[in-house]
């Protein structure tokens, strides 16, 4: 939508200049600037969304370590009260 409005505004402005239609140049300017505003607004919205989803290196490292610890705890062989291997 925004890119279409930018294209429309540029084409309107160029055609108006070629035909020396001064009032129509204003409409082309408006379309061009409105399209640019819409595009910038969409880019800001996308940046904010990505910033909310961004995870730091430290957070990922902590998650990996927690998963590794969890797996290590599951793999421990059973022990008796003295700490030796349990006899089943």
Image (cartoon, grey):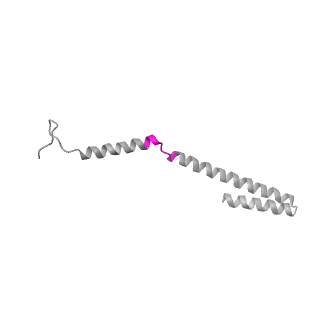
Picture residue at 78% right of the left edge, 58% below the top = 28
Q: Position of residue 30 (x, y in %)?
A: 76, 55
Q: Residue furthest front?
A: 84
Residue at 69% x, 61% y is 4
For the point 72% across and 54% down, the residue is 34
Image coordinates for residue 7, horizontal then vertical, percent: 72, 61
- 74 in magenta: no
Residue situated furthest top in the rendering: 82
**79, 44: nearer the viewer:** 79
Q: Nearer the viewer, residue 10 or 77?
A: 77
Residue 21, image x and y in percent? 86, 61
Q: Position of residue 83 (x, y in %)?
A: 17, 37
Q: Quadrant of the N terminus?
A: bottom right
Residue 20, compared with residue 49, is above or below; it is below
Q: Say which quarter of the image contains residue 2.
A: bottom right
Q: Residue at x 35, y 42 (%)?
A: 66
> Vertically, is 55 above or below 33?
above
Q: Is residue 55 magenta?
A: yes
Left or right side of 16 for 52: left
What is the residue that sits farthest to the left in this orientation? 87
Chief SS of the magenta region:
helix
For the record, the magenta segment spans 52-59
Picture quadrant where residue 86 is located: top left
């Amino acid at each position: 939508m925004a890119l279409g409005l930018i294209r429309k505004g540029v084409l309107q402005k160029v055609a108006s200049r070629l035909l020396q239609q001064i009032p129509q140049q204003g409409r082309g300017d408006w379309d061009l600037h409105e399209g640019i505003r819409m595009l910038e607004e969409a880019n800001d919205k996308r940046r904010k969304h990505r910033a909310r989803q961004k995870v730091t290196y430290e957070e990922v490292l902590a998650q990996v370590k927690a998963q590794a610890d969890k797996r290590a705890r599951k793999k421990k062989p059973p022990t008796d009260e003295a700490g030796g291997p349990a006899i089943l």
